[in-house]
Amino acid sequence: MSDGEGATARSADEQRRIVRERYAAIATESSDGCCDGGADGADDADQCCSSSVDEQSREMGYDDADVDAVADGANLGLGCGNPTAIAALEPGQTVLDLGSGAGFDCFLAANAVGPTGHVVGVDMTPEMVEKARENARRNDTDAVEFRLGEIEHLPVADGTVDVVISNCVVNLSPDKQQVFAEAFRALKPGGRVAISDVVQTAPSPEDVTENPAALAACVSGAATFADLEAMLDRAGFEAVSIEPKDESASFIREWDDERDLSEYLVSSVVEARKPR
Amino acid sequence: MKESLMDILCCPLDKQDLELEVVRRDDDEILDGRLVCTECGEEYPIEEGIPNLLPPDMREETPA
């Protein structure tokens, strides 16, 4: 599948490695306070100071109650929207989070589905899953489970999930078609995806697409609206809707010191339904 | 890992059911053990409560 998979000849394995390394570093840094500057640049350090994370989260669409509902440490400010807000979750539902990171959206989802619901977070970075598990203890929640897994090869049985959520992760995948096919398989008939992700609005300059850091930072891997729609369609989804959030420019602009990435990217709400 | 979630787990490769082998558990959950695919026989470790369901080629490069 070649749609929207970026202009470089980077192999899928290489792409996964780059992404894993970056998120492993973030998980490790943020566990021991990272405001003194991260290992790979000041911009990461900015992202994980608790106060600035809370502020960014409000810009992304979380309200104060969301931020306060989860113990510190789960929200690393790495998303680009609030999938739990668009997901309209109901008590008793089973929710699957693709690329669950430190678990923030999973804990919000757990509050929404209640004790009779289940939330499963899948992430391919061991350091993130460990961190999420620690956070689960601090949040005293039984409804959330984290596991190591790859979103292109979900360890989730067919037709078991009501809602698939994901926050700024699908763009990182070297095989987005496969991600949507797997989400479709795991969903119950009538189940939905409610994803927040960046979409490419203009081709990014060559020096950006060739820079591995830009891939891992959710910049160069983003697909276009047309590609995303075609992939969801091909996976079998109906009622596909991809809604750009123009206000996301305010935080996307902060992602890079040198250039304004909002010229190439917009955060969007991606919704679709598996036919009944 | 909680046993109640076995229902929605499957082998990431062939999507078949997994069988649980418990090595260590506490009141709430399984801390160490294995998940074995009933079809292909692939084994997935559970370590410190975290099931590692990465496909085998990715698991090998996972740091301990």
Image (spheres, rainbow, N blue to C red):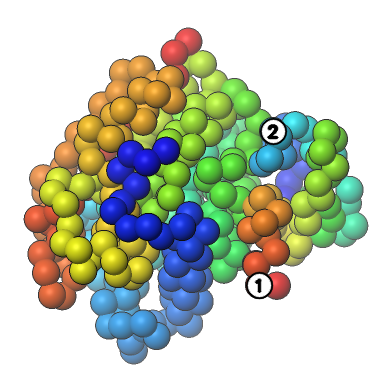
Residue A106, image x, y percentages: 48, 48
Number of other residues with Cα within 10 Å of mark 1, as a class: few under 14, some 14 to 19, many 20 or more: few
Q: Which residue lies furthest to the front in this view?
A: A9
Inspect this view and state whether residue A113 appears. Answer: no
View extreme (bottom): residue: A36
Tag 2's secondary structure? loop
> On the image, which quarter does residue A118 sit in?
top right
Residue drawn at point x = 55 percent, y = 26 percent: A185
Q: Would you say A123 lies left or right of A74 here?
A: right
Q: Are marks 1 and 2 on the same chain?
A: yes
Q: Amino acid type of disc 1? A: Pro
Q: Where is residue A108 in the image (x, y as percent from the top left)?
A: 43, 46
Tag 2 residue = B15
Residue B43 on image: x %, y %: 81, 50
Task: Using the image, name the chain to which the residue with label 1 belongs.
Answer: B
Query: Residue B63 got which mark?
Result: 1
Q: Which residue is drawn at 50% across and 76% down?
A: A28
